Amino acid sequence: LAGGAALAADPPAYPGLPSETPESVTPATDSFDYEKRVVQIPMRDGVKLSTVILIPKGAHDAPILLTRTPYNAAELTSHNESSHLAALIQGYDHAADVIVEGGYIRVVQDIRGKYESEGDYVLTRPFRGPLNPTPVDHATDTWDTIDWLVKNLPESNGRVGIIGISYDGFLSLAALVDPHPALKAAVPMNPMVDGWRGDDWFHHGAFRQQGMGYVYEQVVTRKNEAKWFSSHYDDYDTFLQAGSAGELGRRRGLGQSGYWRKLLAHPGYDDFWQQQAMDKLLAARPLTVPTLLVHSLWDAEDIYGAPAVYKALTARADSAPLVRMAMGPWVHGGAIGDGSFIGAIKFRSDTAWEFRQQVLKPFLDEHLRGIKPARPLARVTAYETGTGRWLGLDGWPRGCTAGCRIQPTPLALQPGGALTLGGAPRGGDAGFDEYVSDPAKPVPYRQRPIRPMGYDEAKGLTWPRWLVDDQREASGRTDVLVYTSEVLTRAVKIAGEPVARLVASTSGTDSDWVVKLIDVYPDEVPAQPALGGYQLMVSGDIFRGRYRESWSQPKALKPGEPLAYSFSLPNANHVFLPGHRIMVQVQSSWFPLYDRNPQTFVPSIFDARPQDYRVATQRVYRRSVVELPVVVAE
Ligand code: PG9
């Protein structure tokens, strides 16, 4: 013991064999093609935000490209340790090729309360107003940051762009609210826009419970050090065993997260959600900054956001001319990666590279570098899935540049699992198909075992691509209704949001309805055998029955009564090719991505007790249709 005490107070020195570790180390950066500066930028309330600035060596008159993030600026600016800027920024949240080719000064900042920045963190902090009584928000923080950058970077040309994916796409939208005059371009990619209607937290009121781990890690510590833990290899078991999302939250100590308490308090579409929906906020003011929205057609996280903002902004004559949108066949964030395939689905080319070179680069060149594009960028650049070609359109939704229009056309659910496009339902109004929805055996949303949300193919975390999973498993279940068309003899193109118009009853007092629109490949596809009979979902969504009459005031359903449900499915720009068939699947759970509806009306499904979960008999009536936005010649 005495020896140990001496050791602590007076560490031994061995002059004959001194330590090889210096007191501090200075990286040798002479060969680097960039200079890295890490600065603390003061905000108007005195809080300092940590900001990493990467300046190409020898830069002058260089434009600045800013990303604001809660995901660790230091890590996002060191994807690889390298003397080359391109390697450093190879990954989230960069379009490395465009940034390096354009000579941009790349700036990535920790938002307040995260990682090296001071201040408090509030997840998707609302704007100043009833939900945020402080003098600061993401609009003021972006303004203060840009002001500092243009005054303190002599290498810059004074023009700033903001870019980011998902949360950072939301932050790019936030920059548009009272923007700094030096902000000349914004590129919100897959932005989170409305957490209730169809982005991260709910879809039409059904809670996306696999995001609970995100809430925990993101909120309970500044540096995401406390980790959500697994209890089962298969998330299906984890969530089923816990019962309700509320109960799982209790078991994991999630109540320590302020954001979780907000989710529990706001299951419906109340002021909390409406007042922070970015499309609504941006529609209330003229847009003054050229904006390129980027949308992924198979976005597993924010499939609602970008087109909703496009719609809101273009509804204003003063904002519309400044808005552009690109939509591609990508997963969430896929526009910065390899866009030649998603899982088994291959495209004809690297669509993400094409977007970056032909849309993103000229857009940024024009607004940040003053280079006029060879030809003006189309209002909307949309990839047509099925055929595999890019279309330049003058708006969205549009079927073509000229000579066509969109005709809403009913896809009718017919007896015997038939499906017909156009024409009336057969078999009389009273006909229906029936299934039993058992909350003890909810329909898995993908093949089990179902791993958590995560982006690591090498570790089997394939969450981002689940929307292109083969739907064959589901179509074989007795609790999934399946309707299939004849083999198509001519192509059917859709552009826009399909609308599910169900007439359905439940024997319970609450119910979820999932509607999936599927492209069924030919029985055999010799060029890629695994695609023979593949059931590719091109659009699909869930609706929580209690919100049938009002999204903010849930109401019990009348048992056994055929009731009308109408809800939009995500945008598609797809051609069902000759030789393919169209399929619709209807089911009442999509588990464990969405929490189970107990099928008994309770005040909040977060608090449903085990005895509330009851088997229900579901009937889908013949009057039900999926209305397709079919493109027809004029
Ligand atoms: N979809 C993620 C997210 C955005 C906003 C809030 C919470 C989560 C993201 O990828 O950033």
Image (tube, rainbow, N blue to C red):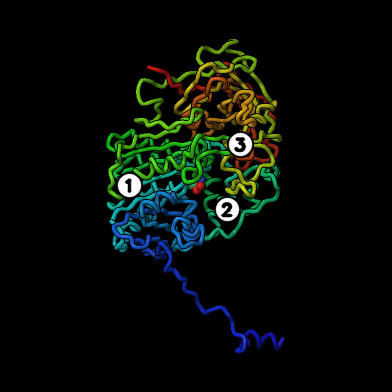
Q: Earlier in the sequence, mark 3 or mark 2?
A: 2
Q: In the displayed structure, does residue 602 sit left or right of residue 307?
A: right
Q: Which of marks 2 and 1 is nearer the N terminus?
A: 2
Image location (x, y in percent) of residue 271: 44, 41
Image location (x, y in percent) of residue 529: 64, 30
Q: Are marks 3 and 2 in contact (CB under 8 Å)?
A: no
Image location (x, y in percent) of residue 465: 57, 40
Amino acid found under the numbered disc labelled 1: Asp
How many marks the image carries: the answer is 3
Q: How crowded is mark 2: few (under 14 residues within 10 Å), some or many (20 or more)?
A: many
Q: In which quadrant of the rendered view does residue 152 lie?
A: bottom left
Name the residue carrying label 3: 602
Name the residue carrying label 1: 365
Residue in the image at 45% along x and 39% along y = 295
Q: In which quadrant of the rendered view does residue 38 lie?
A: bottom left
Q: Earlier in the sequence, mark 1 or mark 3?
A: 1
Name the residue carrying label 2: 216
In the image, 50 versus 534, the foreground residue is 534
Could you tell me which quadrant the C terminus lies in? top left
CA distance separating discs 3 and 2: 26 Å
